[in-house]
Every structure is written in structure tokens, then in C-alpha cells.
Amino acid sequence: MILERFREGLKVLLNDERLSQTIITNSDVEEIADKLLLEAGIRDYLDRLIYSSAAYFSAILLTEAETLKGINLEGLPCPSKVIKWGELAEFIG
């Protein structure tokens, strides 16, 4: 179940000293989010926000949203990698 995978993944993240939390938004992140709405048709604000934050920081995007995979808009930054929550524990090792 997706909720269980999220909680398990969150535990892994919070207990890994190699990782830290980041700012989720700023004006540059919001600009990327706006382009996702206007150019890619991504309507869900939270999806746009997490994608844009990961793209802005060149970070890994953790998501179950299929709509966020394979976005390739010219001039739009993208996350360094996109993985599902269920893949997180294996990815971190």
C-alpha cells in the first residue's frame, strides 16, 4: 500500500545521517512549478512543488506520481533522478 511505503521510506530518510531536509520552495522553485502547469499540464500543485524543489536543488525526486516521470521540457531543470518510495531503502542501501 502506498501509505505504508511512504511511512517506511520516511523512516529510512530521517534515520540516515547522510541526508538532510531542504527548503521546499522559493521564487525559483515556484517559477519551475508554474512552467510545469503551463507547459506540461501538471495540475496538482503538490506534485509540481516536489518536482520543482528536486529540480532546483538537482536532487532525487521521491514520488509515486507517474505524471512526473520523463518530463523533458526545453530549458526546464529536472531532478537528478526519479525513484518511487518503494525503491528508497534499496537505493540508499
Image (spheres, rainbow, N blue to C red):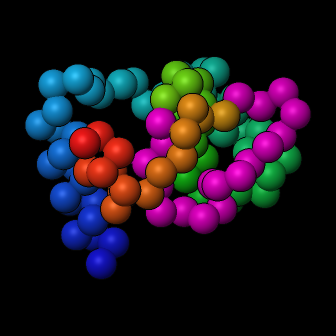
As drawn, the residue found furthest toward the left would be: 15
Would residue 62 appear left or right of 71 to someone viewing this image? Answer: left
Q: Can residue 50 be seen in this view?
A: no
Q: Is residue 12 left or right of residue 66?
A: left
Q: Residue drawn at (66%, 34%), measured in percent from left and top?
A: 78
Q: Nearer the viewer, residue 57 or 83?
A: 83
Predominant secondary structure in magenta? Answer: loop
Quadrant location of the N terminus in the rendered image: bottom left
> In the picture, residue 18 is in which quadrant?
top left
Quadrant where the C terminus lies?
A: top left
Position in image of residue 26 (x %, y %): 53, 22
- Residue drawn at x 74%, y 48% as measured from the top left: 71
> Residue 85 location in percent, x, y?
36, 57
Q: Residue at x 64, y 55 (%)?
A: 69
Compared across the picture, whether 3 is left or right of 75 comes to: left
Asked if the stretch drawn in magenta spans residue 72, the answer is yes
Q: Is residue 74 magenta?
A: yes
Q: Give the range drawn in magenta.
A: 60-77
Please provide percent x and percent y for residue 64: 47, 63
Visible residue check, residue 64: yes
Q: How many marks?
A: 0
Give me the residue at 16% from left, 38% from top.
Answer: 14
Quarter location, residue 77: top right
Does residue 16 lie above or below 93 as drawn?
Answer: above
Residue furthest bottom in the image = 1
* Res 29 quadrant in image: top right
Q: Which of 28 and 2 is in front in this view?
A: 2
| Closer-to-camera residue (56/33) | 56
